[in-house]
Amino acid sequence: MRDTFELNPDILAELRAPRPYPAVSLLLPTHPASPDGAEDAIRLRNLVSEAKKRLADDPGVDKAALQAVEARIDEAAASVDSSEVTDGTLLLASANDWEVWKLPVTPPERVVVADTYLTRNLVSSWLHERPYWVLVLSEEGSRLWHGAGESLTEVTGFGFPAKPELPDHEDAEPGANFGLQPSPYREERLRQYLRDVDDKLAEALRTGKGPVHVVGTANQINTLVERSRSKERVGERVERAGADKLTGHVLLDVIRPAREKYTAERQRDALDRLGEGIGQKRFAAGTDEIWQNVQEGRVHLLLVEDGFQVSAIPEATHLRPAASPEDPDVEDDIVDTLVETALGTGADVVFVPDDALAEHGRVAAVLRY
């Protein structure tokens, strides 16, 4: 089972790639607080049965494809671990592959059969959770964590935890590192060590988006950030020694104020950029107008209120209001599709507090031209 914080543009592109029909997506609300997962297991079996019936009744699915996809569905369902589930689970299966993703928000129960996987719930969850990194600096060993919302997981690849080399013999000399002036040899070794940590960090950051909040002493943070290859990714700086000894749960509490500050500043910046776009007449507002611009790849920055959802029927250039929620062409939340499509064209997406876009129809965009 994969976590949403693992998602990155390359993985998303692979998941969105066309597949031989049928590609099956199963969305299931799950319950992490359930002591034995019995209710989830029953609902999963029922959803799998529904998917198999849909496939068996589909004249476009031949016997070989039916057997292959059913086998992949069974493998995906068997991999669901009740001890690891979150508020939602997404199972993806085609004739050649399968994946299972944990979702941090509750999705609607649903089976979708198409020639691509359903990824908008995954993307929406990923963005709402605002993925981030935490680099904890320590001369005893620096650690890297990857987070999404209130979930924080330690990274154990890319050379992390990053241990320093053995100390120089200068450190063993009596009085070498005492007093107001630290040994220049020791300071140079610290710079060398943090350069090595920064190289490892740069490799890790290639795998995912999000800011890096750096935790350590003021000297450690300044020394690393001053010449960092990833300076533009650095978010907030938290001055605290000994954080390398903290558990993920405690570290989450330590960095929460920094995360909240970073999110608030990014939201303010996005709203300021929208104001500039309005002044330059490079903006769009409302789902239908933005839908047209997203399809044309004109959206540079998309702003969406956190709680905004709307149903509609997507067409080539417009969104048609749904006459009935039972209409087979209606999308329960067209905002997720807007977000996913915008990301696919290289747009930046920022969720803002509810009512921040009240005068713009709850969703707005700054256009490239």
Image (spheres, rainbow, N blue to C red):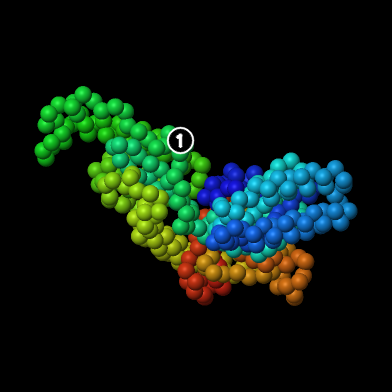
Residue located at (62% from left, 56% from top): 89
Residue located at (11% from left, 38% from top): 179
Residue located at (15% from left, 34% from top): 177
Image height of 362 relative to 292, above or below: below
Q: Position of residue 111 (x, y in %)?
A: 73, 59
Q: Secondary structure at mark 1?
A: loop
Q: Position of residue 52 (x, y in %)?
A: 80, 54
> Hey, which quadrant is residue 290 in on the image?
bottom right
Q: What crowding class fits label 1: few (fewer than 14 Cα within 10 Å), some (14-19), or many (20 or more)?
A: some
Q: Is residue 225 visible?
A: no
> Hey, which quadrant is residue 123 in on the image?
bottom right
| Camera-nearest residue between 258 and 18 | 258
Left or right of residue 207, residue 59 in this image: right
| Camera-nearest residue between 67 and 232 | 67
Image height of 320 relative to 158, above or below: below
Q: Can you say which quadrant of the picture contains the C terminus? A: bottom right
Q: Position of residue 150 (x, y in %)?
A: 46, 57
Left or right of residue 219, residue 205 in this image: right
Q: Position of residue 304 (x, y in %)?
A: 53, 65
- Name the kind of residue labelled 1 in the image: Phe
Q: Which residue is mark 1?
A: 158
Task: Specify the farthest residue to the top.
Answer: 169
Image height of 191 relative to 113, above or below: above
Left or right of residue 102, residue 114 in this image: right
Q: Is residue 100 visible?
A: yes
| Camera-nearest residue between 58 and 304 | 58
Residue located at (27% from left, 34% from top): 190
